[in-house]
Image (tube, helix red, strand yellow):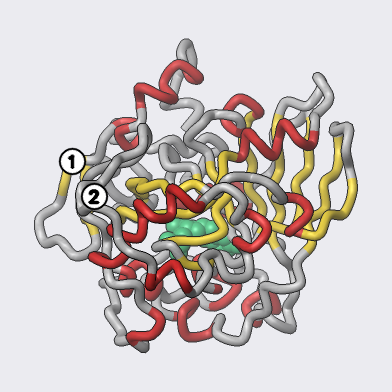
Amino acid sequence: MLIRRPHLRGIPSSEITPEGLYHNRREFLKTVAVGLAAAAVTTILPASALAAPAPEAARLRGKYDTDEKLTPYENVTTYNNYYEFGVDKEDPSNNAKNFKPRPWTVSVEGLVKKPAVYALDDLIKGFTMEDRIYRMRCVEAWSMVIPWLGFPLAALIKRLDPLPSAKFVEFKTLYDPNQMFEQKRPLLEWPYTEGLRMDETVNPLTLMAVGLYGKSLPNQNGAPFRLVVPWKYGFKGAKSVVKIRFTDKQPRTAWSVANPSEYGFYSNVNPEVDHPRWTQSRERRLGEFFPRKTLMFNGYGDYVASMYSGMDLKKYF
Ligand code: MTE
């Protein structure tokens, strides 16, 4: 993972949800979210949502939302890591334009009662799409605040009904070198793979996202379906997931296979465990000049620290 300065390329204004409009619409969204799930992946919002009367400006914050300033849509969608589309931050937004996130299937495998290949719409049918503002911290020491749209992974786990022997969940992403040219090179072990321990998958913070800023996920952010785990470094957030496998063994993960001394399985944000090549105690929020202090578990300790009690987090980094 290389460090580059943010590249703020202009994108068509039609692609951008202005932040003010987003904030008002967010309240509206809350009232229409139920039932949108089936439509979510294709359009997320009916066009009429934009024109709907905006409720009062006061923002009702959800339990898990941060009230920090949102990172502008331009940064969120042009400063990306998605190695299948190139290794520089601006590559994914430039190179993923023709990627086809539809139709999309997800194969559910392993120690689970309902294994099958599901059409994405069927897999997520009936789930309430929630609008969650999360702080995201990348291992490369930059961070963002992103308004995701998605549903708790716990709901999907419940629907799929894992066997008691399942201890971990592996997420595999799309392997399609014809669409993802970098998969023709052995940059990483393809397809990009991530994993979580079972209790981490059902933690209420863990989301499967289908959108951000109230719109469908842009290709470069992992369309149509990606993992978001806000207390872990960004690379845990596997993009364009096509396989969910329940297993009794800790899964291999793309970065820990590539460089086991630098990237561990847990990858919890931890200011006390430095990356071998740089400090993890500070971060630079995109759009800000002065660095900030990085918070343990990215500030989500109240919700997640108990999952790791008794573990040596220097060893299980
Ligand atoms: N998923 C896939 N399939 N391929 C990738 O290269 N990069 C990861 C993660 N998910 C990656 C991926 C890394 S290193 C980061 S920091 C986040 O995606 C970045 O997500 P964002 O571009 O939406 O901010």
Residue 197 pos. (x, y %): 63, 30
Helix, strand or loop under label 2: strand
What residue is rendered at 49% in x and 46% in y?
Answer: 130
Q: Amino acid at mark 1?
A: Lys
Q: Can you say which quadrant of the picture contains the N terminus?
A: bottom left
User: Can residue 143 be seen at all in this image of the molecule?
Assistant: no
Q: Give yes or no for contact between labels 1 and 2 (Cβ–Cβ under 8 Å).
A: yes
Numbered tag placed on residue 51 in the rendering: none
Left or right, residue 263 beside residue 284:
right
How many C-alpha atoms fall within 10 Å of the one at disc 1: few (<14), some, or many (≥20)? few
Q: Number of labelled discs? A: 2
Q: Is residue 219 visible?
A: yes
Position in image of residue 190 (x %, y %): 70, 63
The amino acid type of the residue labelled 2 equals Glu
- In the image, residue 201 sits, relative to residue 189, either above or below, namely above
Q: Quadrant of residue 74?
A: bottom left
Q: Give the residue at mark 2.
A: 283
Where is residue 299, by image quadrant? top left
C-alpha separation, residue under disc 1 versus residue under disc 2: 6 Å
Vertical relation: 183 (above or below) 144: below
Callout 1: helix, strand or loop?
strand
Q: Going from the N terminus, do you reach mark 1 or mark 2 first?
A: 2
Q: Is mark 1 within 8 Å of ligand 1?
A: no
Q: Position of residue 267 (x, y in %)?
A: 47, 39
Identify the residue at image location x=89%, y=42%.
115
| Residue positioned 35% across, 25% down in the render | 301
The residue that label 1 is drawn on is 293
- Examine the rendered structure and indicate whether residue 27 appears above or below residue 76: above
Relative placement, left or right, of 187 versus 104 is left
The residue at 57%/38% (across/down) is: 265
On the image, the x and y values in percent for residue 313 come to 43, 24
Front residue of 264/166: it is 166
